[in-house]
Image: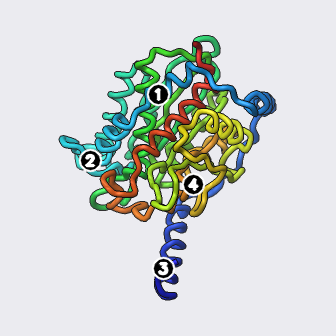
Amino acid sequence: MRGTGSVTLVVLVAVVASVSAAVQNVSYEPKRPIPAASQHRLKTLLSKYSNVTGRSAIRDLIARVTESAVLDHALQLSGEAVGSVQESRVSDKTGPLHPFGIDHAIEYVQAHMQTYGFEVELGEWRVGYGPNVISCIPGATTPQEFVILGAHLDDIPREGRAPGANDDGSGSASLLTIAAAVGDSGVKFKRTLCFEHYTGEEQGLLGSRAQAEVRYDRGDDVVAMIQQDMTAYHLSMDDAGVAFVTDPRAVSPDLTGIVESIAREYADPLLIVHPTVLSGTSCCSDHQSYAESGYPSVGLIEPRGYTGDPQYHKVGDVVRRDDYDVEQITMTAQVALAAAASLAEIIS
């Protein structure tokens, strides 16, 4: 470790403050139990995927997830692309007084998801906040069962420019790229596959909690919810990697084990799969909302945790910087798609 003791103290104080900022708006709500039938299905899937055999249909599908597509979406969402008018994606900066707020990002996602052939719904959950963008392809044989890929579209800081390229432009760009791969391939699944871009995450998982409640009240049978939040930061001393959230209050350990097994089979050889974060915190993101509603969820994250990125929640959270790794986002997206395609039961 380089530096004097006083510098070390400053760093430690900064880390503590950063962790505090990460969790200040989030509390753990009483968790509904996963229903017995869902628990039984999880155990069956855990046994099935304890020894994964790769399928060519899934390998062909994830090969469609490309760096160039991820980069394009990330630059558009952060406002760095030529012609992008995106200035901020703060959830409650909406309407005519904020023409460059989250409304623009919502319209961008909605238009692309419709182009990719998805049925798109705007899920309004609170007046004055941007809606969730919910995009689905109905399952061919068991459409009443859902596999969900999630990311949050909003960002902070609240004042001034808020590019949010990593938090969570990385997850949002990943979902758009995965959706294009699915749509362009024409592939079908037995179960309904949904992509959910949430708002209100930075205010305390508000949008995803509202969406999970909608599904609970409707009686939806969610097989799996797979969240990607902050997958771009790559510390120079590390290999490219992906890690898993392990707090059982926020994720399903069984589903996490299933997705980790799938990841180890399909991950690019350059991507190291870590069972948990190497440092930093793994609290909190939208997978927690589904866990609280009694649905199996899993969280994918960069190896240094939600607070490892030195530009976390800052105006410097942009794509064009040395430690923002588009290749790492892409490889993580491929893992997420492999998991979703396996659990939604791709029809080949």
Between marks 1 and 3, how big is the CA–CA gap? 41 Å
Q: Earlier in the sequence, mark 4 or mark 3?
A: 3
The amino acid pointed to by label 1 is Ala
Label annotation for residue 79 = 2
Label annotation for residue 284 = 4
Q: Which residue is mark 1?
A: 63
Q: Position of residue 324 (x, y in %)?
A: 39, 53
Between marks 2 and 1, how big is the CA–CA gap? 27 Å
Label annotation for residue 2 = 3
Decide: few, some or many residues near mark 2? Use Cα within 10 Å; few <14, some 14-19, many ≥20: many
Q: Earlier in the sequence, mark 2 or mark 1?
A: 1
Q: Quarter holding the C terminus?
A: top right
Q: In which image quadrant can residue 131 be found?
A: top left
Q: Position of residue 196 (x, y in %)?
A: 49, 35
Foreground: 44 or 120?
44
Q: Residue at x 40, y 26 (%)?
A: 180
Decide: few, some or many residues near mark 3? Use Cα within 10 Å; few <14, some 14-19, many ≥20: few
Decide: few, some or many residues near mark 1? Use Cα within 10 Å; few <14, some 14-19, many ≥20: few
The amino acid pointed to by label 4 is Cys
Q: Nearer the viewer, mark 4 or mark 3?
A: 3
Q: Secondary structure at mark 4?
A: loop
Q: Position of residue 264 (x, y in %)?
A: 64, 38
Q: Secondary structure at mark 3?
A: loop
Tell me: residue 199, above or below residue 140.
Answer: below
Could you tell me if the residues under marks 4 and 1 are in contact, i.e. CB atoms within 8 Å?
no
Foreground: 315 or 45?
45
**Count of labels shown?**
4
